[in-house]
Image (tube, rainbow, N blue to C red):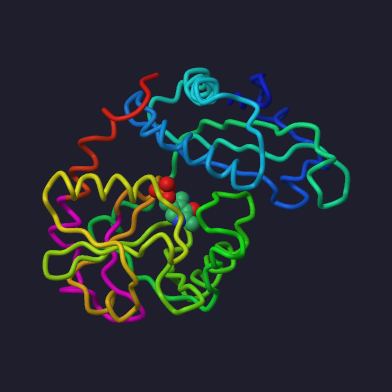
């Protein structure tokens, strides 16, 4: 495997950055997780736009333009023969001294890793996930804004560990007001009486690319969709629930906190949207 670092493709074992990089010292940096389907880098432009928004939010000047960044992602797939897989694009603050201030960092480092992807086992797509709500809350927008896809993922990692301790693969994170923000690495949707609901971004969710894909697909199909405040009560009493994420795609949820959702099986709207999603993934994005 060849990894892109700052203008060069190097062997995996030589793909290293400085221990003084503030990405390592402080989680000071940003990233994107991107899927490739049949030689198509899915919604690459949307990912790069989100990366630019993250960079702007943390006052980081990206060293590459949108076009250059796009080429880096595509080239890392080509070099590694990845026609179906996953790209992790990372921009760290760069090498500096031990102080918090990024003023000592000369320039951000760009890293792109193209690899195969390990998905949730197939049975979870056919049978659905049982998830829980964990005690760790999602950070509020006045702290580290959850819209920023930063290298500082401890908030979500804590929640993920709490889920694992209780045998769940994913978990709902509430915000400080008790409304649902999102899951540890996925956005959440429910279906109730034919209407699709997802937490409003202001509740502390990442503006997921897959979330947006589902919103677009729902609109194209005249499915009513509301972005609003949701509590666990709405999920417990929903007809269907599913999660969205670049790695997970659309994965059904059939129980939350030991309450069965709907009839406890993946529902028709979830299936319809997942199949519509599959139809578009290899056609929408940058072709390799
Ligand atoms: N929320 C969080 C916290 C995430 O890390 C991710 C990405 N894994 C998502 C939601 C889903 O976003 P996307 O559809 O862009 O992958």
Q: Quadrant of the C terminus?
A: top left
Q: How many marks?
A: 0
Which quadrant of the view contains residue 186?
bottom left
Which quadrant of the view contains residue 225?
bottom left
Q: Quadrant of the N terminus?
A: top right
| Residue 176 to residue 61: above or below | below
- Residue 174 in the image: state x and y as whole percent: 46, 73
Q: Residue at 58% x, 31% y: name it.
A: 112
Q: Nearer the viewer, residue 95 or 161?
A: 95
- In this image, 200 relative to 114: left or right? left
| Residue 130 to residue 184: above or below | below
Is residue 252 on the magenta stretch?
yes
- Residue 168 in the image: state x and y as whole percent: 43, 69
- Residue 11 in the image: state x and y as whole percent: 66, 24
Where does the magenta region start and end? 251-272
- In this image, 144 relative to 256: left or right? right
- In this image, 144 relative to 130: left or right? right
Judge whether residue 85 can be spotted in this image.
yes
Is residue 169 on the magenta stretch?
no
Q: Residue at 43% x, 63% y: name it.
A: 202
- Residue 219 in the image: state x and y as whole percent: 18, 48
- In this image, 75 relative to 214: left or right? right
Judge whether residue 169 can be spotted in this image.
no
Q: Nearer the viewer, residue 218 or 40?
A: 218
Q: Residue at 52% x, 18% y: name it.
A: 79
Which quadrant of the view contains residue 200?
bottom left
| Residue 123 to residue 133: above or below | above
């Amino acid at each position: 495997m060849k990894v892109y670092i700052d203008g060069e493709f190097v062997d995996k074992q030589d793909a290293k950055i400085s221990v003084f990089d503030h990405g390592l010292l402080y989680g000071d940096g940003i990233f994107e997780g991107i899927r490739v389907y049949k030689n198509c880098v899915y919604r690459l432009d949307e990912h790069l736009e989100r990366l630019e928004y993250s960079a702007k939010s943390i006052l980081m000047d990206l060293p590459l333009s949108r076009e250059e960044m796009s080429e880096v992602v595509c080239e890392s797939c080509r070099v590694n023969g990845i026609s179906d897989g996953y790209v992790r694009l990372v921009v760290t603050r760069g090498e500096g001294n031990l102080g918090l201030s990024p003023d000592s960092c000369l320039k951000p480092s760009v890293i792109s890793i193209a690899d195969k992807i390990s998905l949730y086992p197939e049975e979870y797509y056919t049978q659905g996930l049982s998830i829980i709500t964990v005690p760790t809350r999602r950070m509020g927008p006045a702290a580290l804004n959850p819209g920023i896809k930063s290298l500082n993922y401890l908030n979500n990692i804590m929640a993920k560990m709490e889920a694992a301790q209780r045998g769940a693969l994913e978990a709902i994170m509430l915000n400080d007001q008790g409304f649902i923000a999102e899951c540890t690495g996925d956005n959440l949707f429910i279906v109730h009486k034919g209407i699709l609901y997802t937490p409003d971004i202001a509740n502390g969710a990442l503006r997921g690319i897959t979330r947006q894909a589902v919103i677009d697909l729902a609109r194209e199909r005249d499915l009513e969709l509301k972005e609003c405040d949701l509590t666990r009560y709405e999920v417990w009493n929903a007809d269907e629930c599913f999660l969205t994420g670049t790695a997970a795609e659309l994965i059904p949820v059939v129980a939350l906190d030991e309450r069965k959702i709907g009839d406890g099986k993946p529902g028709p709207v979830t299936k319809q949207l997942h199949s519509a999603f599959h139809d578009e993934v290899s056609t929408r994005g940058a072709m390799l």
